[in-house]
Each structure stands twice: as structure tokens, then as C-alpha cells.
Amino acid sequence: MRKRVVGLAATAMVALLLPFGVASAAPAAKEVLKTYADIAQASYEDSLSSAKTLRTAIDALLANPTAETLAKAREAWIVARVPYMQTEAFRFGNPIVDKWEGKVNAWPLDEGLIDYTDPSYEAGDENPYGKANVIANPKVKAAGKTIDAAKITKKLLADKLQEAGGVEANVATGYHAIEFLLWGQDLNGTGPGAGNRKATDFSKTDCTNGNCDRRAQFLKVATDLLVEDLEEMAKAWGPKGKARAEVQKAGEKGGIARILTGIGSLSYGELAGERMKLGLILHDPEEEHDCFSDNTHNSHYYDQVGMMNVWSGKYTRTDGTVVTGPSLSEYVAAKAPEADAKVTAAMGQTLKAFQVMKDTADGGKMAYDQMIGAGNAEGNAIVSTAVDRLVDQKKALETVVAALGVKIEIEGSDSLDDPSKVGK
């Protein structure tokens, strides 16, 4: 069940397509880093607020599981992704964020760890917990260990199940665990349609697929954890927060390097590579970010919006107010105007490519998992063009790195750097 995300996208487009400021003198690096931290704080605060709205919708679903309350919870989840995906520009350059991020956005996940799955389901290679089905089993035996899951608690999900056995695909917390519980498996392959879980999977009186009370408890606990984790990161970027302090402490070159590392690595290794090119090579619907909800096109789009927020020093909040200040673009323009122009132009072209992807999916023509399907020349071309523009964006950012004389390390991906290794 796809919902069109409106309003916020249009607002972001207007803000992002306005000309970036060009100052006659470079703003102080300290001011640029403050703007960066201010946007991070606002983005995480909006993510927190939307997660609380999601929690309210999920509470309503669990109190009265109907098709209507399930649809509202799903819509709240989709809306919650809009501000969160814009925060991903703060990854890679900030160790605090990287250490924390897996709790809220880890993917892909082995669904069989959490709940029932279709008989055709196969867990990832070498995952002894891949079919544990914690919701159905109060005791989980795997890898020579027994986990007491009689009570579904925050400690169980966060400390015992999350990455159980050291396997990253064992995801029990965050947006995607919640997504799976709201939608269920997407069994349509590269055909139309998302997951189709019934509201009665949470019913106390008309339970379908068994263990509805435990399923409801798992969803409730996972949602509460998401709120708590976002509270932690919003505070970390606040006036006295550790993440903000570390950016300022890094100094001019160190701080600017952090910003460029985040944008460069998200552009290239993470988004262009692991989230897009890999799925395109494999034509595998499991290699899409929001695979249960068919919301991947929006998640990718708002990743790009988030990178442009950081570059332009401007973020439009969910309430319509704008956080802005001296920007990295202004800083670069004063020192290396040609490099600034290259990045600004590249980002605009990338956004256009993602807008095509978003419009195609939002219009109901084809979802992202259909776009990456084998034999879909039109869909493959849409995704491939967006990947190419992200690579161009990364190359443009490298001209900035060279011009400023800073040192960064951009994350790579076999799917881009050595495709022959993919699948081996």
C-alpha cells in the first residue's frame, strides 16, 4: 500500500533550487560548523517528533486493530522517514552517529528472526538466528546458546537480539523492524505490490497467524526504543551535546573534512553503491532499502535532499520554519568558486534524477523494486541515471577536497569499484 508523500517534497524542492549564496569573503569555519550542527539538531528533533507521532498511531493500532488504524500507522511510518533520511548526511564523518546509527536504520534484516515468514523464505547465509521467530518462541536456541524471550523487553531487543551472533542481518530494533511488523514480507518480487500484513495479526479477539499479543508487544517495544534512540541523538547535537562539541573541536580543516566525508561517502559508497548499484546488478528486490513498504524511492530522494541541506546551509523543518546560516557552499565559493559551482550543479542534476524516480513511483507507474528488476529497461535506466549522477556528485566534491587541501576518506563499494566481486 503506497502513499504519496506530499507537501514536504514540494517545500524542499523550492528551497533547494534557489541559488546558493556566494560571499565575497569566506565565512568563518566556526560559523559554517555551527550551521552544520544546527541543521543536525533540527533534523534529529524533527525525526524525534515524527517518531512520537508514529508511536501514537501504533498505540491506536494496537488498541483497535483495523484496516484503518493499520493504514494510519503505515502512513505515519512513511512520514517519519522524511526527516530521518535527511539526517544521513551526518553519518561517516561523525563517529558518534556511526556508532549509533545501526540501532535505528540497520538493513537488510532477516525477517525470520522476528516473526513468521512464507515457506519460501531463506535466511541469510550462516545466520543461525535467521528463522528463530522470536514472536512465536519464548525460548530461542541457536548457535549453542539459549535466549530467554519469554518477556519481550527493550533489553531483549536491543541487547540480545540486535546483531545476535555477530550477524548484522539480525535486526530487532529501528525503523525497519517496525516496517516489517507493519507491512509483513513483500512477496511480490519485482511485481507490483508491497507487504500485505493484516491488522488482525495484532488482534486480541480475532488473531491471525498466532501470537498476536507478543507481536503487538514487539511492535510497541521497538517503537519505544526508536523514540529513545532519537532522543539521544537530538540531545547529542544540542547546545551542550557531545556531537556538536566534537565538530567544533575538530577545528577548521578537521571540521570541514567531517562535512565533506559525510556527503562524499553517502553519495558514493553507501547510496550509489550499496543501496542502488548493488540491487541493480543483482536485480534483487531484497536489496532495496524500504523493502516491505515500497517506500525506497522516498528514502533515496530525501538522502539527496539531506546532502543538499548540508551543502547549502539551509534546512526546512517539518513545521515549515527554516534553519539557515553560513554554509559550506559559501565557504568554498570564496576560496574556490569553480569547485563550488561544480558541486552546486552536480547536486541539482542528482536531485533531478531522483525526482524522476520519485515521480515514477509516487504516480503508481512502478515501484523501486520493479525498477531494478531484470528485463525492465526503463526502470533500470532510471536507477542507473541516479547512480551516475551520484558518482558525478562525488567527483565534484573531490575538486573541493583538492582545492581546500583537506584530507578525507570516502567510503567505497564493490558494486562500483569492482563489480566482478559482487555475489562472490
Image: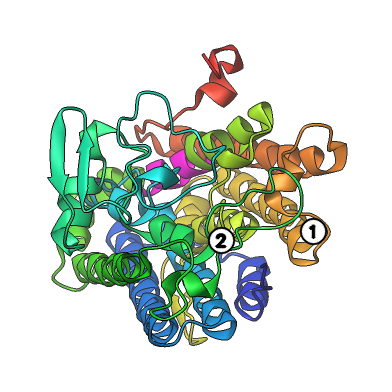
Query: Badge 1: few (under 14), some or many (20 or more) residues near its Cα, within 10 Å?
Result: some
- Locate the N terminus by quadrant: bottom right
Image position of 217 (left or right of 410): left
Which scheme is used to colour this image of the protein?
Answer: rainbow
Pointer 1 residue: 360
Asked if residue 260 lies in the magenta stretch, the reply is: yes
Query: Horizontally, is 225 left or right of 310 in the view?
Result: left
Q: Residue at x 43, y 53 (%)?
A: 89
**Is 163 or 422 nearer to us in this picture?**
163
Residue nearer the viewer, 366 or 417: 366
The kind of secondary structure element at disc 1 is: helix
Instruction: Out of 238 and 201, give the one closest to the viewer.
Output: 201
Residue 302 circle label: 2
Where is residue 177 shown, x and y percent of the image?
39, 57
Highlighted range, magenta: 259-267
- Mark 2 neighbour density, 10 Å: few (under 14) some (14–19) many (20 or more): many
Is 191 magenta? The answer is no
Q: Secondary structure at mark 2?
A: helix
